């Protein structure tokens, strides 16, 4: 399993959000791509990037427009977070609806 994983749930439809493109990026001199993936049928990405990352600031960028459509209010969701323990698992789930989203550090 990779160090960073995610799970996207579609709260308005009551099901996982399958097929959402997600990028993992690292902050340095600007942002650089670490990994990219797409949520599976269960709305999860279990293999997003390496199993170890250096301590630092990272972000997940969710292309919600490709899932919700061109008229969606949030075409992209960016969740920026800090890794302080390069060996600890970091799970970042998204609860998505057409006009709102929420996130937290999962387990």
Image (cartoon, rainbow, N blue to C red):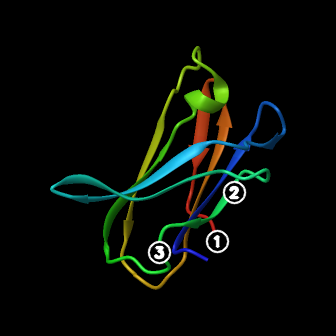
x then y, percent, for residue 55:
32, 76
Quarter of the figure that contains the N terminus: bottom right
Eye-nearest disc, 2 or 3: 3
List the single residue furthest toward the bottom: 87
x then y, percent, for residue 25:
37, 56
Q: Residue at x 56, y 27 (%)?
A: 65
- Return the mark for residue 44: 2
Residue that badge 3 annotates: 50
Viewer-side residue, 59 vs 82: 59
Q: Residue at x 15, y 56 (%)?
A: 29
Earlier-in-chain disc, 2 versus 3: 2
> In 3D space, how far apart are the residues under numbered discs 2 and 3 (Cα atoms)?
16 Å
* Secondary structure state at the residue bearing disc 3: loop
> In 3D space, how far apart are the residues under numbered discs 3 and 1 (Cα atoms)?
17 Å
Q: Residue at x 59, y 20 (%)?
A: 72
8 to 105, vertically: above or below: above
* Secondary structure state at the residue bearing disc 2: strand
Relative placement, left or right, of 96 versus 103 is right
Eye-nearest disc, 3 or 1: 3
Mark 2 and mark 3 residues within 8 Å of each other at the beta carbon: no
Residue that badge 1 annotates: 107
x then y, percent, for residue 63:
52, 37
Q: Residue at x 65, y 26 (%)?
A: 68
List the single residue furthest toward the right: 14
The local crowd at label 2, few if under 14, some if 14 to 19, many if 20 or more residues have their Cα within 10 Å, is many
Number of marks drawn: 3
Viewer-side residue, 16 vs 81: 16
Mark 3 and mark 1 residues within 8 Å of each other at the beta carbon: no
Mark 2 and mark 1 residues within 8 Å of each other at the beta carbon: no
Quadrant of the rendered image containing residue 104 = bottom right
């Amino acid at each position: 399993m990779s160090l960073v994983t995610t799970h996207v749930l579609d709260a308005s439809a009551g099901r996982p959000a399958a097929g959402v493109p997600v990028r993992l990026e690292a902050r340095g001199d600007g942002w650089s791509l670490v990994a990219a993936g797409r949520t599976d049928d269960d709305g999860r990405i279990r293999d997003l990037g390496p199993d170890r990352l250096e301590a630092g600031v990272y972000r997940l960028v969710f292309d919600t427009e490709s899932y919700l459509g061109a008229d969606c209010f949030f075409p992209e969701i960016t969740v920026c977070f800090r890794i302080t323990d390069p060996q600890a698992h970091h799970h970042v789930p998204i609860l998505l609806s057409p006009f709102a989203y929420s996130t937290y550090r999962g387990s």
